[in-house]
Amino acid sequence: MSAEGSPRSLTQPPQAELAAAPSFRVVDITEAVDDAVQAAGVTEGLACVYSPTTGNIVRLHELESGLLEDFVRLLQRLVPAGDPGRRASLIAMLIGPAGEVVPVSGGRLALGQWQRVLLIVLSEEAGRTEPAWLVHAVGS
């Protein structure tokens, strides 16, 4: 708890991106999420990372090029090309949640050795005003 008696929290927008394939992007947001946790002053608690965009998914996973290539091939087999918005929504339903909760310990994300916080962008819709992702860190 903060000095005022309420949980500390912070919302942070995205930073860097990593291209994976023409049909979607995988953005490694781990460092930005960790920075948001540190800026919020949370040393023990939780960081909830969430995307308010239907065509985005937040996942905890290893960021490895072979895995991403296999993932692209799997998606192409599961969900054939078609209307981009509908395709992105279907893929999002199949492969993951809009958010993840990560423990915070010692003021840092408590991730496994190779785990990263990944934003998978399945659809880039023009005119969107909401951020690609948000992090809300709470704790003491």
Image (cartoon, rainbow, N blue to C red):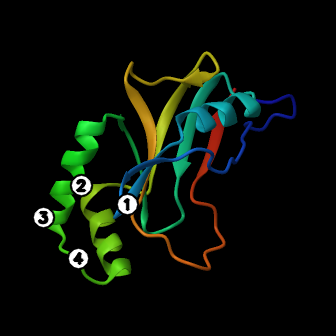
Measure the alpha-carbon separation of dots 1 and 3: 15 Å
Q: Residues within 10 Å of mark 1 (few under 14, many from 20)?
A: some
Element under disc 2: helix
x, y (%) of residue 1? 75, 29
Amino acid beneath label 4: Ala
- For disc 2, the marked residue is 72
- For disc 1, the marked residue is 24
Residue at image position (24%, 47%) is 69
Residue at image position (61%, 75%) is 128
134 sits to left or right of 86: right
> Which numbered disc flags the more N-terminal residue, 1 or 4?
1
Residue at image position (53%, 35%) is 30
Q: Residues within 10 Å of mark 3 (few under 14, many from 20)?
A: few
- For disc 4, the marked residue is 81
Q: Which mark is residue 77?
A: 3
x, y (%) of residue 79? 19, 70
Q: Are marks 1 and 4 in contact (CB under 8 Å)?
A: no
